[in-house]
Amino acid sequence: MTNLDLAKYKSLYLKTAREHLIDLKKNLFQLNQNPTDQQLIYEVFRLFHSLKSQNYFMGFEKTANFCKALESFFRAIKEGKRNYDPTKSQVIQDTFTKLENSLANIEKDNTEIDLSQDIINLEEKLGVNMSS
Amino acid sequence: MTKNIMKLLLIEDDVFFRKFYVEKLKEKGFEIEEADDGEQGLEKTRSFKPDLIILDIIMPKKDGFEVLNTLHADDNLKKIPVLVFSTLGQESDVEKAKKLGAADYVNKSLFDFNDLLAKINILTKNKFQPTTSK
């Protein structure tokens, strides 16, 4: 975490994070139609990576860790270590709602939602260890 | 006091990081150009001729690895030092980037401006003296 006053960057952070979520929804929708499309897989991976990086930067570590788990999941798909299974799409879509809720809390009073249990739940639902 | 105006090119797809770092580096007296993907980054490398490139890895169109490959294949461009802009969980990406010619890296999510300035200074052989620190 930085010792800079980041308050002036909070609105830019919230704006870009929400744009990333909109793009994630679009790309996931398309990925469900074309589950092996490498460009779409890369886009979903890239967007979770961006969300992770922004949240670490702003000091919202729990939200960042949640995004990092999803980034790791899509990195493994990108690297051919696993396949994307469209039947698990709802699990990924549910993470968007959790991230939106965390952003709403951050906007309201600068507190994020603790998503650590949600990472464990994700691992169970997707059948992978995403913490590495 | 600024002895030389150092030209930096920031290649970074995330508008949040781009706006933040461009603003902070301009405050320090750098002349800075920005690119939002690897393709545009290579075009601006040729036109702007930066003294140093700060390069994100995970980007659309051309990623940081492709940018490094292209730079390395060009006798003029490969002389420009590249500082990789990474974050937590990208240790293997940083190692790969170094093998492709990147000189060093900074963690963009753990903002340490003194570390960034020190690395810029080392890689540009101390041509730049920062203005008063904020």
Image (tube, coloured by chain):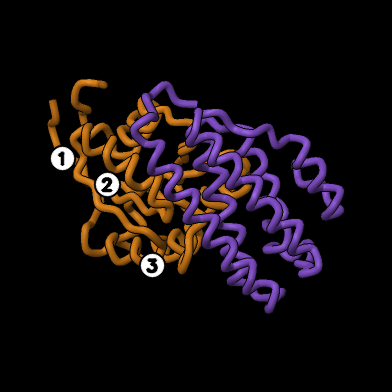
Chain colours: A purple, B orange
The residue that label 2 is drawn on is B8
Residue A33 located left or right of residue B104: right
Total of numbered circles in the picture?
3
Residue B112 point in image, percent of width and height: 42, 27
Residue at the (22%, 38%) spot, across then down: B26
How many angstroms separate mark 2 from mark 1 (CA)?
Answer: 9 Å
Residue B8 located left or right of residue B71: left
Tell me the amino acid under the disc marked 2.
Answer: Leu
Whichever of labels 2 and 3 marks the residue nearer the N terminus, that label is 2
Q: Secondary structure at mark 1?
A: loop
Tell me the amino acid under the disc marked 3.
Answer: Glu
- Quarter of the image with the C terminus of chain B is top left
Residue at the (59%, 63%) spot, across then down: A25
Within the image, what quadrant is residue A47 found in? bottom right
Residue B133 point in image, percent of width and height: 25, 21
Q: Secondary structure at mark 3?
A: helix
Q: Secondary structure at mark 2?
A: strand
Tell me the amino acid under the disc marked 1.
Answer: Ile
Can the viewer see residue A87? yes
Residue A48 point in image, percent of width and height: 59, 52
Q: Chain of mark 3?
A: B
User: Which of label 3 and label 1 is nearer to you?
Assistant: 3
Q: Are marks 2 and 1 on the same chain?
A: yes
Residue at the (47%, 56%) spot, across then down: A19
Q: Chain of mark 1?
A: B
Q: Which mark is on residue B39? A: 3
The residue that label 1 is drawn on is B5
- Nearer the observer, A117 or B23: A117
Q: Is residue B40 above or below residue B12?
A: below
How many angstroms separate mark 3 from mark 1 (CA)?
Answer: 25 Å
Q: Are marks 2 and 1 in contact (CB under 8 Å)?
A: no
Within the image, what quadrant is residue B90 found in? top right
